[in-house]
Image (spheres, helix red, strand yellow):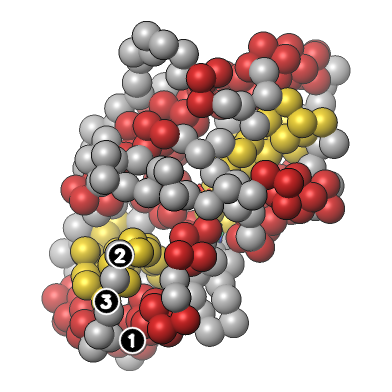
Amino acid sequence: MQVIESVYEMQSLAINLRAKDRLIGLVPTMGCLHAGHLSLIEAARKVTDTVVVSIFVNPIQFGPNEDFDAYPRQRARDLELCEEAGVDIVFAPEPEALYPRGFSTYVVEELVSRPLCGISRPNHFRGVLTVVAKLFNIIHPDTAVFGQKDAQQAAVIKKMVNDLHFCIDILVEPTAREPDGLAMSSRNRYLSPTQREDARALYLALQAAKALVDAGVRNVDRVVAEATHTLSSHRRVRVIYVSVVDRCTMESAREIIPGKCLLAVAAWVDEVRLIDNLLL
Ligand code: AMP
């Protein structure tokens, strides 16, 4: 496995690989890898010849009062996990390599990125799209793999790929969960044992809402109320949003159409911000 920090070196290697007709798969991550990331790597391995994992805590997708400095970093362990998972190349640049002094060009999507996390995290998706577009131009992947855990992020990236004519297949893999249902996330490390218990509320809320839909309920307000009630019954949990949206556009749904709608939730568990979602 090669570990590359230089943009130039990565770009040259990618151009060489493509000249040899090798299919390149990219899994962009912020590191602190867990089984969710490993499932994306596995998916990339199935459809490409050379798997590149990028590890980069992207400063421009964090707001001024968010957890950029505190974000967990574990480079040595991540490299071990990538090696075990059969990754060919890890691209792990320093922030200055991607954002040299004077950097001033950003990618903004103006529809799918607006609701949900776009409201509570202004500029977040601008940061995500900018770094993903840069990674696409540096690594030249044929396929890039993302997680359904960040459903709005995946939808915004698909929109950018379509709008800007990137020739890249976007795969979206299911959410990997802990045995009790909590979606795996690098941020789960912030949770104390008592907060960890309350964090389960997100999964319970999604399940309670899904049970209503499975029983034939199609009224959005009723389903949202059920999920909100479950979240609010946990002492440390404060709701940021609970919303039924179209799974592609992220627009609020007027009624529930099974297979087409997504229930998305975001909540604080004390000072830890968690998100989750379920296809209805
Ligand atoms: P992150 O390192 O949190 O930026 O995530 C990198 C990629 O892994 C993104 O495409 C995420 O959607 C995906 N991911 C994060 N958590 C999970 C999970 N629990 N299951 C599947 N994919 C995930």
Q: Is residue 100 above or below residue 166?
A: above
Say whether residue 221 is visible. Answer: yes
Left or right of 116? Residue 57 is right
> On the image, numbered disc 2 is attached to which residue?
271
Q: Are marks 2 and 3 in contact (CB under 8 Å)?
A: no
Q: Quadrant of residue 167?
A: top right
User: Few, some or many C-alpha atoms within 10 Å of disc 2 (few <14, some 14-19, many ≥20)?
Assistant: few
How many discs mark residues in the rendered view?
3
Quadrant containing the C terminus is bottom left
Residue carrying label 1: 208
Marked residue nearer the N-terminal end (3 or 1): 1
What separation in Å lies between label 2 and label 3 (alpha carbons)? Answer: 9 Å
Name the residue: 51% across, 79% down. 181
Question: Within 10 angstroms of label 3, few (less than 14), some, or many (20 or more) residues?
Answer: many
Q: Decide which of tag 2 and tag 3 comes sooner along the chain.
A: 3
Give the x, y percent position of residue 160. 40, 31
**Residue plotted at (27% across, 86% down):** 234
Image disc number at residue 134: none
Say which residue label 3 marks: 237
Q: Amino acid at mark 3?
A: Val
